[in-house]
Amino acid sequence: MVRLLIIDDEESSCRTLKLYFEGNGYEVETEQSADAGMAALLARPADVVISDIRMPGRDGLSLLRDIQEQMPDVPVIMITAFQDLQSTVSAMHGGAVDYVTKPLDLGELEGAIDKALAVKAERRDSGLLVETEEVTGPLVGLSTAMNEVFKAIGRASQGRVAVLVTGERGTGREAVARAIHQASGDGDKPFVAVSCDAAVEVLLESELFGHITGAFSGADSARDGKVKLADGGTLFLDDVDNLTAGLQGKLLRLLRDQEYTPIGSTVGLPASVRIIGSTDKDLRSEISAGSFREDLYYALSVATIDVPPLRQRADDIPVLVEHMIRKINKELHKNVRRISQEVIDQITAYEWPGNLRQLENVLMRAAVMVPGDVLTVSQLPAEVLVPSAKTEGDEMDGMMVVTDRTLKDLEREYILKVLTDTGWHKGRTCEILGISRPRLERRIDEFGFARNGD
């Protein structure tokens, strides 16, 4: 039986809620102050706490903080007659799983209880603990695919050769370039990154090679380019396939002769710089199409490293999530300490067309919505949730899903399947479904379920 602790200074409200929820199969205890409520909770833990915010003496937000500190696994629902932004924000920041305003809609409140029980069940699963130790280095991965990348970085970093890093957008090509720079023993030297997708050729040429005073309209003073700034270190050219034919020729000279000429000058300048280029294109196809120089390709790809997409390194997802959440906690001042197993299952099943960049963005959006310290599947955006069935005739977990069934039909079949799979263990069934025991009992009656032999 689900045990509720209701804390509200209004006796009539306590009496009404106790009568309603006891009539629906819950065990209910009521208290009329924050201190009495906390004492009752410590004496006998509840499955869910429902607390008013504004009460004489200590308010509900103070109580919420105490519960989070002393009994963080107990979900708390806040209620109030005063709907305002400050109270809502404070309640959600404090770790409340939901916030319901008076006059109370009992159906809405029961829905909040179901949500709280689902959160509690997710908090109990094995999930992923987020350790506090920092992961060093720009790359994270345990998979065979990433081990090959690590070995390639080791080989490329043994000398100051040019490197071409390939891979889809968002896979971490710049992180690979930085790892090469660090592994080469150049960590104290400059690492300068340049995007090669500038629309105006002269602006990109100026950014790369610099210019002298009066070189073009608006060049009122001389400017050093990124080649000069990276001297002694590494120049990373992202999307190198976007370079125009003219700039490809100038880059080839830099690679072959370690020399360049600023715009407007006639004097070549020496440069001691490692060049690492990156692309998401097949440069051999670009060569065949006449848009990329073959001699530049060979000069740039003395060493090549292909970074696998995230869908090919699913084994890395748990450690990536942990690494990213640590970073997000620090940047957003969050305190996410556990990732539910359902979250890991969902994001491992998703294909991540945007790769690491998309994964980090999704985790950041989810972390913003976390009410406490556990990130659950309810915080994930809908677009990354992998449905259990997609097309007519798909078979999932022994059930044939047909698209002309109603939602009620699917609910009936799913509840019956979970009951059967658990041997009619109603407590376990409630955990799997994320609903309360009274709601399960009502569904059993509504659908006319009967255990074999009953």
Image (cartoon, rainbow, N blue to C red):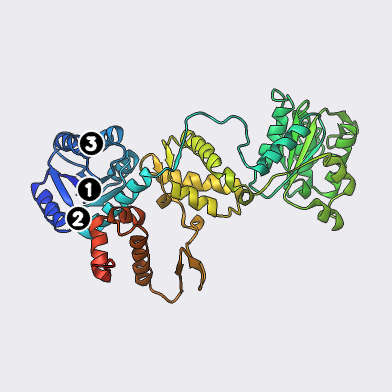
Looking at the picture, which amino acid does disc 3 mark? Leu
Viewer-side residue, 5 vs 220 = 5
Quadrant assignment, res 162: top right
Q: Do the residues labelled 1 and 2 touch (CB within 8 Å)?
A: yes
Residue, disc 1: 79
**Neighbour tally class for label 2: few under 14, some 14-19, many 20 plus, Cα within 10 Å:** some
Distance between the Cα atoms at labels 3 and 2?
21 Å
Relative image position of residue 89 (x, y in whole percent): 33, 43
Q: Is residue 376 above or below residue 188?
A: below
Q: Is residue 5 in sight in this rendering?
A: yes
Point 25% across, 49% down: residue: 83
Relative image position of residue 423 (x, y in whole percent): 33, 59
Looking at the picture, which amino acid does disc 1 mark? Ile
Q: In this view, does 109 lie above or below 8?
A: below
Looking at the picture, which amino acid does disc 2 mark? Leu
Of label 1 and label 3, which has the lower sequence position? Answer: 3
Q: Do the residues labelled 1 and 3 touch (CB within 8 Å)?
A: no
Q: Is mark 3 on a helix, strand or loop?
A: helix
Residue, disc 2: 104
**Left or right: where does residue 83 sit relative to residue 131?**
left
Quadrant assignment, res 360: top right
Distance between the Cα atoms at labels 1 and 2?
8 Å
**Left or right: where does residue 350 sit relative to residue 207?**
left
Q: Is residue 221 in sight in this rendering?
A: no
Q: In this view, does 24 lie above or below 327?
A: below
Of label 1 and label 2, which has the lower sequence position? Answer: 1
**Left or right: where does residue 333 sit relative to residue 90?**
right
Q: Is mark 2 on a helix, strand or loop?
A: loop
Circle on res. 63: 3
